[in-house]
Amino acid sequence: MNNVAIKCNNLKKTFTLSKKQQKIERTNLNKKVAVNGLSFEAYKGEIFGLLGSNGAGKTTTLRIIGGFVSPDTGTVYFGQKNITDVPPYKRSVNTVFQKYALFPHLDVYGNIAFGL
């Protein structure tokens, strides 16, 4: 029995930088590699975390898993099913944003139920 819940295989994502972004990042390059060759397996019942410094590709990886960003190369599996090209609304995954997603006037239930 295969206990792999999520498998990412050789993910790569590159973004094109605008002139303004190039100036902010102090580079003449017009491309930025956000994720480069990332592979991992997360197992059912496991607590799994992505750790890294700013700009390491953690959020981009989560956006790829959620279907909000398409990888340049690589695949994403839920169990045995390749969901790399499946749209976000057909994936059995949810996203909790890091900031600005909570309504201070709602309790925990209200904030969770708001998006349902």
Image: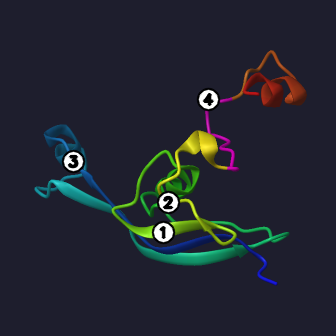
Residue plotted at (71% across, 27% down): 102
Residue type (three-letter) at the residue carrying disc 1: Thr
Find out whether the residues at labels 1 and 2 contact each other: C-beta distance under 8 Å: yes
> Which label sits in the foreground, 4 or 1?
1
The CA distance from mark 3 to mark 1 is 24 Å
Which mark sits nearer the N-terminus, 3 or 1?
A: 3
For the magenta stretch, what is the residue range?
Answer: 92-101
| 36 over 93 or under it: above or below | below
Secondary-structure class at tag 4: loop
* SS for dot 2: loop
Marks 3,1: beta carbons within 8 A? no
Of the two numbered discs 4 and 3 on the same chain, state the one appearing first in sequence: 3
Identity of the residue furthest to the front in this view = 81
Binning the other alpha carbons within 10 Å of mark 1 as few (below 14), some (14 to 19) or many (20 upward) gives: many
Q: CA distance from mark 2 to mark 3?
A: 24 Å
Outermost residue to the top: 105
Q: Are the residues tagged 4 and 1 within 8 Å (C-beta)?
A: no
Q: Position of residue 31 (x, y in %)?
A: 20, 57
Q: Which of disc 2 and disc 1 is earlier in sequence?
A: 1
Is 67 included in the stretch rendered in magenta?
A: no
Q: Is residue 38 visible?
A: yes
Three-letter amino acid code at disc 4?
Tyr
Counting the numbered discs, the total is 4
Tag 2 residue:
84
In the image, which disc is placed on residue 100?
A: 4
Position of 56 with respect to 16 (left or right) is: right
Q: Secondary structure at mark 3?
A: loop
The chosen color scheme is rainbow
